[in-house]
Image: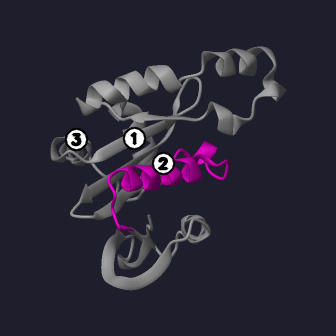
Amino acid sequence: MRELLQRFKDIVVYDADREFYAKIFPDSVSRDDLLRMRRMTGKDLSAVLTIENTNYDFPWSEGVFKDCFKAGYSCWVCEDVDRILGYSIVSIAVGEAHILNISVAPEDQGQGVGRKMLTHLVDVARWYKTETVFLEVRPSNIGAIALYQKMGFNEIGIRKDYYPAQEGREDALMLALELFY
């Protein structure tokens, strides 16, 4: 039922006029207006894996993404008119949301795509009435940390040796966002 409702929402929310005006009058529509979030499907995995493999030295495999589908995680892509710009995955259970992955194609970083996806994941968490949204981030990922802090996330701890790194392991900063209703 949820998937049927999402398909309906994708049809209703999609604004073809925006795309038309963007092609005919490029300056009349902002890039942010053309960004669209939709549920990730198996057909998206090729584009998602390209982004994953480009961005990470230790990327998730196709099997990990398929396991996310099987587990019922909330998996999303952000696209503009003609291509996937990034993807995001959140696990929601027992009043908590855990952002597992947000990744933006390198050529689209710094243009609001990450913010769009993070805002969407927080909105999904609110829809499920979660109390807290958690995530981990590499201390070396300065851009992501700045975005998370701007969005209200606070550091709550450190996970030692959490991430694989070229020379051993790297810690993870644990961040949380309290949601109030």
- Residue at 58% across, 53% down: 115
Residue 120 - label = 2
Q: Are marks 1 and 2 in contact (CB under 8 Å)?
A: yes
Residue 8 - label = none
Q: Secondary structure at mark 3?
A: helix
On the image, numbered disc 1 is attached to which residue?
Answer: 76
Closer-to-camera residue (121/71): 121
On the image, numbered disc 3 is attached to which residue?
Answer: 69
* Region of the chain picked out in magenta, as a range: 104-133
Lateral position of residue 55 relative to residue 24, left or right: left
Q: Nearer the viewer, mark 1 or mark 2?
A: 2
Q: Earlier in the sequence, mark 3 or mark 2?
A: 3
Identify which amino acid the numbered label 3 is placed on: Phe
Inter-mark Cα distance, 3 to 1: 11 Å
Q: Is residue 99 visible?
A: yes
Q: Earlier in the sequence, mark 1 or mark 2?
A: 1
Q: Main secondary structure of the magenta part?
A: helix
Q: Are marks 3 and 2 in contact (CB under 8 Å)?
A: no
Q: Is residue 43 visible?
A: no
Inter-mark Cα distance, 1 to 2: 9 Å
- Residue at 56% across, 47% down: 116
Identify which amino acid the numbered label 1 is placed on: Trp
- Residue at 48% across, 48% down: 120
Q: Is residue 147 magenta?
A: no
